């Protein structure tokens, strides 16, 4: 499959001498480690991460991160003073690499300023590109191009080190990446007015993140429209996900409704939760009308 390692950085520049930095490393959506905001030391979030690489490799990565952050803070402060940027302000970075099924790879790096896209790094010709054409972005771009040591560090850290180390991390972390948790779906209703009823399908506890949730009216999928509203997929505290899908209907309209859930953990089957019936039903993916099981136990078995 396709896998991505991302390093997230948020630096709050309170003034020219005080910078508060937080960092997080992710393999897909799995937290690998975080940075201590005071010492910039790596704290490992998964038990398999530290053994994945030799101690000397982690020491090298740790030193590269510290050098990068020192240079980053210096360059950003220099630009802020030259262009009279008011303090405090926030700089955010996301960088990493993606490995594709054919084993080719792509590295990336983006910089944000006060919540807006600011710069991106072109890994093909090792140049910085402004995301918005402003005097400040052009100035910072020129400073970075003139400071070749920083650009070379970014190139090595995210184009070489990232790809090499991700191969090893994938080997150690594959069990975590392939983890599957079954979705739990509940359907309930809320009355907005005598003329409108909201049917709510709440789906939670599933992993991995990709999922398909749809409403069926008399067995037919309800198409997108103003009556249908599905939330974003949100994280739970136990490293699973949740979302809800809301369908506005008229009370007692004579139709039957059900929430259908498709997820990798269900295989070729679907989870069907009818409105007005607490049963959970698994239906075969190739024969949607054929009931494969009726009991809740069939879903969790």
Image: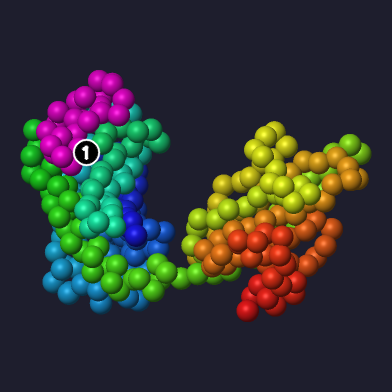
> Compared with residue 70, is residue 287 higher up or lower down, i.e. above or below?
below
Instruction: Pick the residue in front: 86 or 123.
Output: 123
Image coordinates of residue 142 in percent, x first then y, are: 14, 28
For residue 131, which quarter of the picture? top left
Does residue 57 appear in this view? yes
Residue 260 image-quadrant placement: bottom right
Per the image, is 198 magenta? no
Q: Residue at x 28, y 48 (%)?
A: 95
Q: Which residue is drawn at 26% across and 52% down?
A: 97
Give the image location of residue 121, x and y in percent: 22, 38
Task: Give the residue drawn at x 17%, y 47%.
Answer: 154
Which residues fall within the magenta stretch? 121-145
Front residue (pair 47, 282): 282
**Quadrant for the C terminus in the image:** bottom right
Task: Answer left or right for 261 relative to 165.
Answer: right
Numbered label tally: 1
> Mark 1 packing: few (<14 Cα in 10 Å), some, or many (20+)?
many
Color theme of the render: rainbow
In this orientation, which residue lies closer to the viewer: 151 or 22? 151
Q: For residue 138: magenta?
A: yes
Q: Which of 214 and 239 is in front in this view?
A: 214
SS class of the residue under badge 1? strand
Measured from the top left, where is residue 12 in percent x and y? 34, 43
Q: Where is residue 44 in the image (x, y as percent from the top left)?
A: 33, 69
> In this rendering, does residue 38 appear at all?
no
Residue under label 1: 121
Q: Quadrant of the N terminus?
A: bottom left
Location of residue 289 with respect to 71 vertically, above or below: below
Q: In this view, does 255 lie above or below 145?
A: below
Q: Which residue is drawn at 28% across and 21% down?
A: 134
């Amino acid at each position: 499959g396709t896998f991505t390692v991302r390093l997230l950085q948020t630096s709050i520049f309170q003034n020219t001498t005080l910078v508060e930095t937080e960092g997080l490393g992710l393999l897909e959506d799995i937290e690998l480690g975080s940075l201590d905001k005071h010492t910039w030391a790596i704290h490992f979030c998964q038990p398999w991460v530290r053994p994945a690489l030799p101690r000397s490799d982690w020491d090298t990565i740790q030193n590269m991160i510290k050098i990068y952050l020192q240079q980053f803070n210096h360059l950003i402060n220099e630009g802020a003073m030259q262009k009279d940027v008011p303090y405090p302000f926030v700089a955010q970075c996301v960088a990493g690499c993606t490995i594709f099924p054919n084993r080719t790879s792509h590295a990336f790096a983006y910089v944000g300023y006060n919540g807006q896209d600011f710069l991106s790094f072109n890994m093909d010709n090792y140049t910085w590109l402004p995301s918005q054409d402003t005097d400040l972005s052009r100035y910072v771009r020129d400073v970075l191009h003139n400071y070749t040591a920083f650009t070379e560090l970014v190139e090595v850290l995210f184009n070489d080190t990232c790809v090499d180390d991700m191969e090893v991390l994938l080997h150690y972390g594959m069990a975590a990446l392939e983890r599957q948790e079954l979705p739990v779906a509940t359907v309930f209703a809320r009355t907005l007015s005598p003329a409108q009823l909201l049917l709510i399908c709440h789906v939670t506890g599933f992993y991995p993140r990709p999922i398909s949730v749809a409403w069926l009216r008399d067995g037919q999928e309800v198409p997108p429209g103003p009556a249908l509203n599905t939330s974003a997929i949100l994280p739970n505290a136990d490293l699973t996900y949740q979302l809800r899908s809301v369908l506005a209907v008229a009370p007692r309209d004579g139709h039957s409704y059900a929430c259908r859930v498709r997820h990798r953990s269900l295989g070729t089957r679907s989870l069907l939760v009818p409105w007005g019936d607490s049963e959970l039903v698994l239906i075969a993916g190739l024969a949607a009308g054929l009931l494969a099981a009726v009991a809740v136990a069939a879903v969790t078995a």
